[in-house]
Amino acid sequence: MATANVTKTDYYELLGVAKTASDQELKTAYRKLAMQHHPDRNPNNPEAEAKFKECSEAYSVLSDAEKRAAYDRYGHAAFQGAGGGGPFQGGFQGGFQGDMGDIFGDIFGEMFNMGGQRKASRVQRGRDLRYDLSLEFEQAVFGTEKEITIRRAEVCEDCRGSGAARGKQPAACPQCKGSGQMRFQQGFFSVARTCPQCNGTGTLVTDPCKTCSGQTTVEREHKLLVKVPAGVEQDTRIRYSGEGEAGRFGGPSGDLYVVLSVKKHKFFERDGDDLHCVMPISFPQAALGTELMIETLEGPETIRVPEGVQSGREFRLRGKGVPHLNERGKGDLVVEIRVATPTKLTRQQRELMKQLSETMVIDNEPHSRGLFGKMKDMFS
Ligand SMILES: [Zn+2]
Ligand SMILES: [Zn+2]
């Protein structure tokens, strides 16, 4: 044998395991290497193919207790048929090929779905759909109902989802004779591949339904009433289970996701379920105190502003915010006071301001930011 004299790498070394490795360890190591070097994943890469074969050979020996014992005792010489004198004289090359089917069934059956008798299933779950729904600010706060129209694949009524014309049954695939897989020789081992004509199902629709061209589903428009609960916000998703596209060949339908976007309000901003706004007041209102009327989302409310209020002071109206989604209770409405400095004064106002300024003197001294709120005590 031509290859007999080439120095061969130790089988354990090849698989990267210890001589004491368990069957499971061997299998795990081989699986990993085989995945990495499999010809399907490394097209036109002779190095990978060689590596793949080496590993497969190593595994075929070490996974067999009898051969492993012989290998442990005699090394590669155990399998060098002609003149080698090993116990597997001439048997290895022949036996190797025969064993590959089992190895593939065992190792690749699960990975590439090409080993055993299992046929690939054509049953497919339908795709999920997304629908973007835009809401007014108030609709998000209070909830609403909206009818939407979606285009989706629905089960073909003419063939009831079989894909075959009325009264016809799918026939056995002629290419693979109904087995769902094709076997062929690759290098020196036999490989099973999913049949490309029937995608491994073993059956073909020979007389397809005309309505769906054998696809089992057709595109249709569908109307749906979306119930938006109170308290939703930007990017809230509402899931409608099974309202997505129909599955194929009897598979379950996908889901529909209605994704909400919410328009901005004229002055309210949301912070979770709290509503925020800013209310300007004049300096005299701030100094003397005042009553403010604010139009909340649920009608007018009065805020009593005490005299000496500072810019930045917040008033919290409990329970006047956004309802909690799927829960009892509501957020608050927070109104921030801003003292508006006048930018235009009449002659009379300017005169009054001057008089005021002469009687109202404060220290223009810096303070840390936290102390600012206490400054009202400094006005006399
Ligand atoms: Zn049909
Ligand atoms: Zn086929």
Image: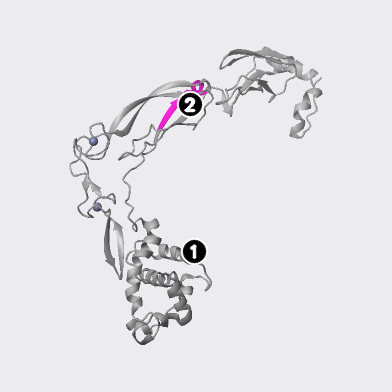
Residue 365 position within the rendered picture, expressed as x and y whole percent measured from the top left:
79, 32
Q: Earlier in the sequence, mark 1 or mark 2?
A: 1
Decide: is 86 above or below 45: below
Question: What amino acid is at disc 1?
Answer: Gln
Instruction: Give the residues drawn in magenta, as a range.
Output: 131-140
**Can residue 117 be seen in this snapshot?**
yes
Can residue 170 be found in the magenta stretch? no
Left/right of residue 170 with respect to residue 250 in the rendered view: left
Q: Indicate the colouring scheme.
A: one colour
Residue drawn where x is 34% and y is 38% of the image: 247
What number is the disc on residue 263?
2
Residue drawn where x is 28% and y is 49% of the image: 201
Return the residue nearer the eye: 30 or 287: 30
Return the residue nearer the eye: 316 or 192: 192
Residue 216 position within the rendered picture, expressed as x and y whole percent measured from the top left:
27, 38
SS of the residue under disc 2 = loop
Whether residues under marks 1 and 2 lie with C-beta atoms below 8 angstroms apart, the answer is: no
